[in-house]
Image (spheres, rainbow, N blue to C red):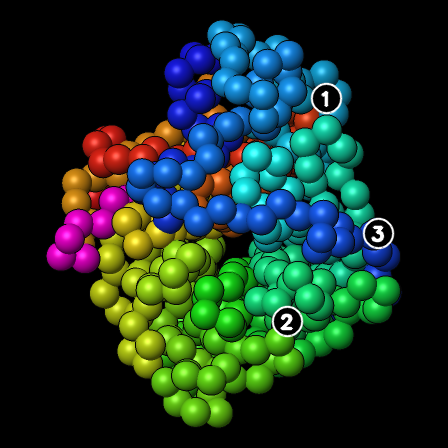
């Protein structure tokens, strides 16, 4: 494993991108313990740093030479300094906690168990809550997001599959999960969804078509849609149709939904019968014309974005692909690919941004991949920061 490749892909995001039933809780970090998020510009901001990097192996102590070879995992111990959580199961959902990126922390969701865990470098994953789920299909716990006002209310939202439907639940410290949006169709396939913040005070949910392609275009159904709602599960102010949750229709098997920190756009990944796609959401309009397509179907999953580019991670190909946005709003060139083969972490699922520079992803190697002893893992990554690459178009 090369030193240069690891430094490029593990640690932080670079300048172009990044930017219900019983529950068990552990203590959440109080807001006053967080470090303030610095406002980053192309000319300034804290220097990206891989967790564990620094003088004497301490984070924040300056950049140090990294080993040219990283020892393989030993049980649940993973020696890669980009890994901040180990020995979990199928991390399809990630919600990054606020921070300046020097000590990344996130909540991750296990698809099949419904467990939500807090991961941080130097600590074992801590159980925050368990949401009852039905993971017998491709559903389960597939979406996770913090409240838009998490510093005040500590609320967590999860998208889950039950025996009867797909739904959104809200989880408050010391309380059981409470359903706030129910009745989203479930089927034998395409139950997965993705949750994210729209960065304008609301939550976004991408839902699958439950195996019925006709539901994606049926405006009376919540399947195959991008929904926008508030913390009570009600349609958010500013939706295209007042009183309606629906922002856009036409999805089939979404893997990720994301917005840059300025809230200027919304992106959603989807897997169709013939290709994987990335859409730029236009509120009130059906999702019919992709902004990018992958005919080789690498398994588009989570995404993260800024006004300058979009990064997606792949659950089949096991890599990350960065698409820079040109001045005219189109994508220029082919994706720049990283985290491939021995330089990566295998299959990738959920993804969320800590801030403009840092993102956390989860691996899904226990679902059709080749897991190592420390899988599944939560990993801090730095996708590519400029065009180039050699991906398909």
Q: Are marks 3 and 2 in contact (CB under 8 Å)?
A: no
Q: Is residue 101 left or right of residue 390?
A: right
Q: Residue 152, position in %: x, y?
A: 69, 66
- Image point (40%, 19%), residue name: 5
Residue to which mark 1 is pinned: 77
Looking at marks 3 and 2 on the same chain, the residue that comes earlier in the sequence is marked by 3
Residue 26's label in the rendered image is 3
Is 342 situated above or below 237? Answer: above
- Which type of secondary structure does the marked residue at label 3 adopt? loop
Residue to which mark 2 is pinned: 168
- Image point (17%, 50%), residue name: 326
Looking at marks 2 and 1 on the same chain, the residue that comes earlier in the sequence is marked by 1
Q: Is residue 35 left or right of residue 229?
A: right
- Which type of secondary structure does the marked residue at label 2 adopt? strand
Q: Which residues are magenta?
A: 322-329
Residue that sits furthest to the left in the current view: 328
Q: Judge whether residue 354 is colored magenta.
A: no
* The C terminus lies in quadrant: top left
Q: Is residue 88 left or right of residue 15?
A: right
Looking at marks 3 and 1 on the same chain, the residue that comes earlier in the sequence is marked by 3
Is 168 situated above or below 119? Answer: below
Closer to us: 35 or 173: 35
Q: Residue 282, position in %: x, y?
A: 29, 72
- Which type of secondary structure does the marked residue at label 1 adopt? loop
Q: Are marks 3 and 1 in contact (CB under 8 Å)?
A: no
Tell me the mark number nearer the camera, choosing from 3 and 1: 3
- Magenta segment's dominant SS is loop
Real-space CA distance between mark 3 and mark 1, rounded to the nearest whole angstrom: 23 Å
> Neighbour class for label 3 at 10 Å: few (<14), some, many (≥20)?
few
Q: Residue 254, position in %: x, y?
A: 45, 59
């Amino acid at each position: 494993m090369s030193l240069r490749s690891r430094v490029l892909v593990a640690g932080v995001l670079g300048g172009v991108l990044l930017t219900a039933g019983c529950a068990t809780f552990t203590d959440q970090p109080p807001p006053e313990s967080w470090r303030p998020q610095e406002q980053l510009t192309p000319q300034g901001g804290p220097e990206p740093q891989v967790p564990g990097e620094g003088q004497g192996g301490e984070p924040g102590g300056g950049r140090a030479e990294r080993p040219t070879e990283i020892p393989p995992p030993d049980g649940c111990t993973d020696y890669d300094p980009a890994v901040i959580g180990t020995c979990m199961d199928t991390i399809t959902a990630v919600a990054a906690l606020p921070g300046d990126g020097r000590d990344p922390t996130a909540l991750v969701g296990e698809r099949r168990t419904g467990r939500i865990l807090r991961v941080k470098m130097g600590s074992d994953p801590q159980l925050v809550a368990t949401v009852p789920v039905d993971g017998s299909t491709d559903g389960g716990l597939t979406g996770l997001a913090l409240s838009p006002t998490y510093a005040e209310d500590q609320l967590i939202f999860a998208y889950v599959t039950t025996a009867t439907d797909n739904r959104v639940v809200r989880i408050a410290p010391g309380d059981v999960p409470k359903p706030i949006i129910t009745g989203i169709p479930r089927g034998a396939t395409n139950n997965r969804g993705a949750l994210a913040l729209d960065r304008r005070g609301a939550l976004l949910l991408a839902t699958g078509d439950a195996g019925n392609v006709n539901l994606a275009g049926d405006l009376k159904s919540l399947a195959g849609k991008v929904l926008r709602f508030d913390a009570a599960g009600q349609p958010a102010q500013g939706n295209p149709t007042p009183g309606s949750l629906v922002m856009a229709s036409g999805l089939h098997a979404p893997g990720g939904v994301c917005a840059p920190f300025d809230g200027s756009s919304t992106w959603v990944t989807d897997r169709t019968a013939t290709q994987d796609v990335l859409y730029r959401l236009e509120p009130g309009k059906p999702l019919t014309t992709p902004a990018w397509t992958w005919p080789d179907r690498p398994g588009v999953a989570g995404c993260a974005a800024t006004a300058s580019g979009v990064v997606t991670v792949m659950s089949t190909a096991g890599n990350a692909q960065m698409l820079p946005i040109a001045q005219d709003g189109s994508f220029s060139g082919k994706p720049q690919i990283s985290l491939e083969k021995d330089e990566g972490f295998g299959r990738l699922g959920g993804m969320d941004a800590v801030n403009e520079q840092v993102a956390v992803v989860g691996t899904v190697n226990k679902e059709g991949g080749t897991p190592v002893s420390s899988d599944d893992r939560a990993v801090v990554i730095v996708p590519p920061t400029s065009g180039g690459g050699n991906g398909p178009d």
